[in-house]
Image (spheres, rainbow, N blue to C red):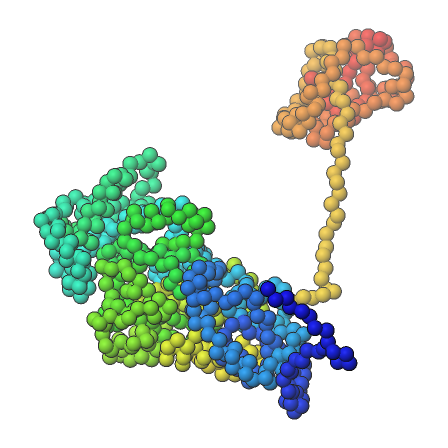
Amino acid sequence: MHQHMQVPPLEGRTRCNYVNLPMINGDRLKTAKTLVDKAIKEKKVFSVHGPYPVIRAGLRARGWVERRLPRPSVPRPRRHDLETEATDEGDSSDDDDLGEEGDREEEADDLYNLMSRLVRNETPYFYWTTRRDSIDCRSLRKDQMTNHYARAGSFTTKVGLCMSLRNLQWFDAADPDTFFPRCYRLGAEDDKHAFIEDFRRTACTSLLLYVLEKYGGDLEWERTGEVHNAKSHGLSKSRKQHANQRVGTSIIDNALHVCQEYLNSLEHCDIDSTLGTTPTLSEQQWKVFLQNYYLVIHEGLTIEGCEDYVERCKCMLEQMRHVCPQMETDGLCNIWIIKPGAKSRGRGIMCMNKLDEILSLVDGDHGIMKDSKWVVQKYLEWPLLVHDTKFDVRQWFLVTDWNPLTVWFYRECYLRFSTQPYSTHTLDSSVHLCNNSIQKHFQPSPDRNPSLPAECMWSCSQFRSWLAASGRGDLWEGVVVPGMQKAVIQTLMTAQDSVEPRKASFELYGADFMLGRDLRPWLLEINASPTMAPSTGVTAQLCPAVQEDTLRVVLDRRYDRNTHTGGFQLIYKQAAVEVPQYVGVNLLVEGTSIRRPRAPVYKPFIQSHPDPLSKSSTRKSSLTSSHCISGKENQLEEVKKAWPTLASRKVTLEKSLIFQPKLRKRPHRLVLPSTCCVLPNPAELHPQKLSHTHAQPDHPPHTQDTQQPTFPLPSNAITGHNKSTTRTNTDLQA
């Protein structure tokens, strides 16, 4: 091995490292400082996170200077790693088109780099980010703007949208089942049982519809051709295998019975049923029913003698249509779509049409039961088709305030087509998922209509031309647009109490709709941070326009209310809540202080038992007391109830009372409640005795036994059974 020997530097020479610094033009530096000083003075410093060249260009044209955010230290995930990335938002950033073309263009212009370095220590007043958690909205100042609202996941996630629309009845007199397909949380036990009941009931209505359209001569059967589609090779094989097998009519009887029981429950006819009531069908009967249902619908078996049930099926379906607004789109195959609660771009979405498969998926994944973020939603089996191909609609809308709720609706939208012809006999994602991130991986089918675009996208104007060619051009403005606007407004109203209403924030959303055969729009989901990548010729034209018009609404309109807002139109603004005017010093509060009540002082009540008197005195005392007792009996009863302590403090004395000398100097007075009976004045009954008693209080006279001395008592005192105040001479002498 050769050892590396360090050679000391030569004497008289120093070692130094040379760094190649770019040459700075003085004029360019002066221009950059002038622009930066003006931007700082007007608070026009912004930061953008993500590939948004249109936003950067629009802000710079308005005199804003960008402060570059630090690049993340972690490497950017590869495209296949994006499948494992789950966010709390409805739609992540620009699909997987995370190109860096905008970054390379900005790095090439050293003027913008120089201006960015000059404002590196300044506070940005405008943030545009891809992810909501990139900026903490709670830490921003009031004059700092951002393109996200905190806690908006209440309607931008599958679970949040499912739960929010259940509260629509408290905000508007509308039924969410008229614009949002039925949706359940698989991880919640109550929702799981509700989904099982819905799946079984939908199987019953689908079977009745099958009988009506197959054997009733309904023209709808020829138009749809759902079950016996010759293009389904697997179905034709199963027909040969089960050509001689038939299913009994008991399956129709059970379906009719289940539907009737459901109608009775809506009319509260089962209000007297107890919890122990036997269900319509047992679990084993349901298992047999679904097996036969799968054989009829999916395998092509016929029902023996079902022609006799056509009228009954037609009558029952008419009743069910009045209470089930989604029967027009439910179809025959009972397909449900399973979605992860917080993923976007079609990741993890599956279509299934058998109950046991769906439940096995839930029971096999403990993560679903733990976070309850997976939802199952009824698939729209009969959508509007363009050249026998399924499509959905991406519609933008902007929220600039949540209190009061202010919603802007974009006039333009675009359609996303599938690459394969539509069929319910295959559950492949290339047929049923129209996301561009899914369809770009498939080649168009050779059976696809050549009139459809190769990029699988149409603009709104192209779709309107197709409607006009089919004689339904007026339905776009009359049915589609009002239905989408109403669905957006009602959804935002249900989530208004959950979102933090920050005044300096705004957010652009992308709503996905499907159209029924009657062109009624059905809301599928609402995405935060919708993709702005120019992946096709349609999005290359529309996405820059919607970004520029967003800046017009949130920036230009702040300085000029009459400015042009581009394609955005204000469709809803809540009425402002009237706040009473503050009167300041004229505010007056009147009242009295509350005093603590004193505890009542109870004195013992001494009740004596006098000797029986003569008939004459008894007669006189009865006359005296009868006048008082007759009118005050009810008051005495109330006194006994109000003074329970007096009844418990009974003091029994002997017949003789001993008066001490102290009592003669300061006689005791009996204190009773004011509600007691008031006796007549003793002077009116015994004037002579009363005057004689007052004349000689210390020496009471000795009289005969029939004449007894009296002592004055308070007029409101009650003593003895007959209210007598007399005492015998023997008692006085004692």
Q: Image height check: is 705 above or below 556?
A: above
Residue 391 visible here: no
Where, by quadrant of the figure, is residue 165 drawn?
bottom left
Q: Image height check: is 114 above or below 232?
A: below
Q: Quadrant of the C terminus?
A: top right
Residue at 18% from the left image edge and 66% from the top image edge: 223
Residue at 44% from the left image edge and 63% from the top image edge: 82
Position of 444 with respect to 526 (left or right) is left
Residue 697 picture location, percent across and down: 88, 19
Q: Image height check: is 186 above or below 37?
A: above
Residue 451 visible here: yes
Residue 702 picture location, percent across and down: 86, 10
In this rendered view, identify the residue nearer to me: 487 or 363: 363
In this rendered view, identify the residue nearer to me: 35 or 158: 35
Position of 691 with respect to 437 (left or right) is right
Count of numbered marks:
0
Residue at the extreme front of the image, as rendered: 1
Residue at 40% from the left image edge and 65% from the top image edge: 345
Where, by quadrant of the figure, is residue 397 drawn?
bottom left
